[in-house]
Amino acid sequence: MEARTATERELRDDRTGGLPAWLLGLAPLLLIVAAVIAFVALDGPGLGERRGPPVEQLAVEKTVLRPGTIEVTLRNDGPDAVTIAQAQVNDAFVQFSGADDPIGRLHSAKITLQQPWVEGEAYEVALVTSTGGTITHEIPVAVETPATDLSFFGLMALLGIYVGVIPIALGMLWLPWLRRIPPGWLRGLMALTVGLLAFLAIDATLEGFALAGEGSQAFGGAALVLIGAAVAFLALSGVSSWLEQRRRTAHAAGASAASSRCSSRSASACTTSARESRSARPTPSARWRSALSSSWASRCTTRPRGSRSSLRSRTCARRSAGSRCSG
Amino acid sequence: MPQLSRRRLLAASVPALGGAAAALHSAIPRRHPWDAEAQAAEVADHHAGHGAGSGHADFRDGQSVDHRANGFDPHEILRDFDWGTTRRLASGQVLREWELVATETEIEVIPGVKYAAWSYNGRVPGPTLRCREGERLRITFVNGSSHPHTIHFHGIHPAAMDGVPGLGAGEIAPGDSTVYEFDAQPAGLHLYHCHVRPLADHIAKGLYGTFIVDPREGREDADEMVMVLNGFDTNFDRANEVYAANSIGFAYMNQPIVTKRNELVRVYVVNVLEFDLINSFHLHGNLFDYFPTGTSRTPSEFTDTVMLCQGQRGILEWRFPHAGKFMFHAHQSEFTELGWQGFFEVVD
C-alpha cells in the first residue's frame, strides 16, 4: 500500500518538477491578475484609439406630459458621453431645462421642454447633440400623464382587484360543484385551466419582450424578462419549500403532543390539529381543491407524502425526476 | 431544526437574492414625477424677463454661437462688401482682383454644435464680391482643403471660366490654384459656388457666396445689406437642422439689425439653401419693391413675401415709415422656428 503511494507521488513529481500543489494552483491565477493589471495600466496596447466621432446613444425611459411641458427621462446606453446642445419639438427649437452637463455612460438625465402641446396630437422631440446628431423621440398621441397621488394608487389598486381578486374569488365558488363532478369532467376542466395558464404565460412573455425592447438596453433589455421570470419561479419554489418544511415540522410536533394538547387547551386548537391530520390522507376532492389554488410548480412539492392517485402520478411523472411526489 | 441540504439552501436563498436585486434597482438614482412640476415652474421663472422668454422660438436661453471663434459674425457679414483691389489696364478697363482660398473650417452653427464646414476665405457665406459692370475681374482661387473644388460664377463668361469639372482648369486639386478671369456682366445680383460632385455636399458645407455687379450708372444710395439664405444639415440626413440668413440662426433676433426711419433699405437676398425645394423672405409691417436677380431697374412686384428656389436671388428695396421693431423671416414656419428669423430695429 505505502510503496504504491510513493510510486504515484514520484510520477507526479516527475511531471511537475517537484513544485508544491498550492503553487501550481496559484501561479496561473497570479499570472491572470498580472496580465489584467498590465493591460489596464498600458491602456490596452495594440487595440488603438477608436476612430471617428463618438457614438451617441440615448434611450428615452419615461415621457411625462404636463400642461405646457414635455418631460423626457433619458438614459445613455451608448459607450460615450452625450452632450445635449439644443432641443426641437416638431421642427422648431424650444426652450428646455436639465441635462446641463454631458450625460455619461449609463447615467440618466431628465429634461423639461417648454411646449404648448395639444391633447390628442402627435409630437416628435429631437435632441441636437454637440456633434450635430439628433436623437428623436416620438409621442404618437399626447395625453396628460396622470399624477402619482393617492387617487392614482387607488385606481391602480382597483385595477388590481378587477383583474387579480374578483376573477379568482368567483372561480373559487365552483369548488362545491367541482367536488361532485365525475373525474372525466374534472380532467377536462383542468386541461382547460392549464391551457389558459400556458396562454397567459406566452402572452405575458411576448409583452414583456416588447416592453423591454422599447427602453434602454444597457441593463439587459429582453434578457431581464427571462431573468425576472426565472427569479420569480425560484422565489416561489423557495417559499413553497420553506412553508412545506415548516408545516411538516409542526405536524410532527403536533402529532406527538396531540392527546395532551386536546385535554389541556381550547377546542379550537384541537380542531386545527384534527384538520391537519386529516390533510395527511386527503380525499380526492380535497386534493383538487389544493391543486386548483396552487401552481403546477408548487403542487408536486406541497402535496403530502404517501397519497396515491393515478392522475397525480401521471402529472408528476411528466415533471423532473427529482420531484418529491414521485416517491 | 430542518436539515440544510444544498438544494434547500439554494431554494431558500432565492427570495433573498430577489430582494437584494430589487433593493439594488431602487438604489439607482431616479427622479420622481413630482420633481418635474417644481422644475417646470423654475424654468418658467427663469425665462421671465429673458430674451428666450420673448415668445419666439430660439436657442436654449437665447444663447448664440461664439462668432469670434467662428471667425465671422453675421452682423459684420451683413454689410461687408468686398471690392477687391483694382488697377487700370492698358486698354483703360478696370481690373479688379480677389483671392479666394478654400479651407476646411469648423464652425459653431448652433450654440454648442460644431460643424465641419468648407469655406471660401474662412467664412460662410464666402466674401461678398462686388464690382461694376464692364470691369475685368480676376479671381485667383487657391484650394487649401483636402478635396477638389472649383468656383462656378453665375453671370456671362467664356465656357473655360465656368468653374465646372472638365472645362478650363476643371477641378482644382488640393494644393493647386487657378485664375478665373472674365468681364463683369450683366449688372445684377449673382452668386458663386463650388461645382464639384457630390454637388449637394460641396454647396451645403458652405462653399458659396454673393457676387454683385453694380450697373454702370450705379444705384441710389441706401443702407445696403446682403443676406445669404442657408442652412446646415448637422446629422447628414439630407435635411437641415438649422436655417438662417448668413449662417447663424436667430442671430438677428437676439441682436436686431438697426436701420433709420425713412432711409432706403436695400437687401441683396440670395437663396443657396440645400435639401429644401424652396425658401422665402417675408417682411413685417411693410412691403418692398422686388427686383428679381437685380437685372431690371423696374420692380416686378410690390409685395411682402417672395419665394426663391436654390440659386434664385433678388434685390429688395423699401423704407420704414415707422420706428420700432419689425420681423423678417422665411414664410415657411418650419424654417422660421428653426433659426431663419430676425428683427429690424428702426430708429429715428
Image: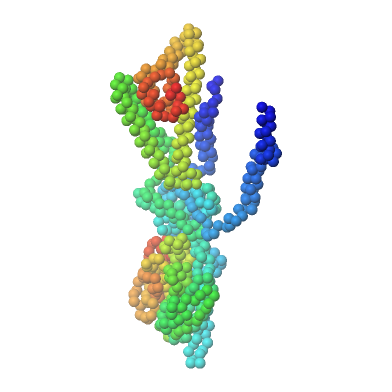
| Quarter occupied by the N terminus of chain A | top right
- Count how many numbered circles sit on residues in the image: 0
Q: Quadrant of residue A267?
A: top left
Picture coordinates of residue B105, whole percent (x, y): 53, 68
Q: Quadrant of residue A304?
A: top left
Q: How is the image coloured?
A: rainbow
Picture coordinates of residue A195, whole percent (x, y): 34, 33
- Residue at image coords 48%, 20%: A247
Question: Relative to residue A188, is residue A61 drawn left or right?
Answer: right
Observer able to see residue A118: no
Observer-nearest of A300 and A148? A300
| Quarter occupied by the C terminus of chain A | top left
Question: Relative to residue B114, is residue A176 drawn left or right?
Answer: left
- Residue at image coords 42%, 63%: B238
From the viewer's perspective, is residue A21 above or below residue B346?
Answer: above
- Residue at image coords 36%, 24%: A311
From the viewer's perspective, is residue A84 above or below residue B11?
Answer: below
From the viewer's perspective, is residue B63 above or below residue B3?
Answer: below
- Residue at image coords 41%, 41%: A208
- Furthest-right residue in this view: A18
Observer able to see residue A280: yes
Observer-nearest of A144 and A236? A236
Picture coordinates of residue A102, whole percent (x, y): 54, 53
Observer-nearest of A150 and A308? A308
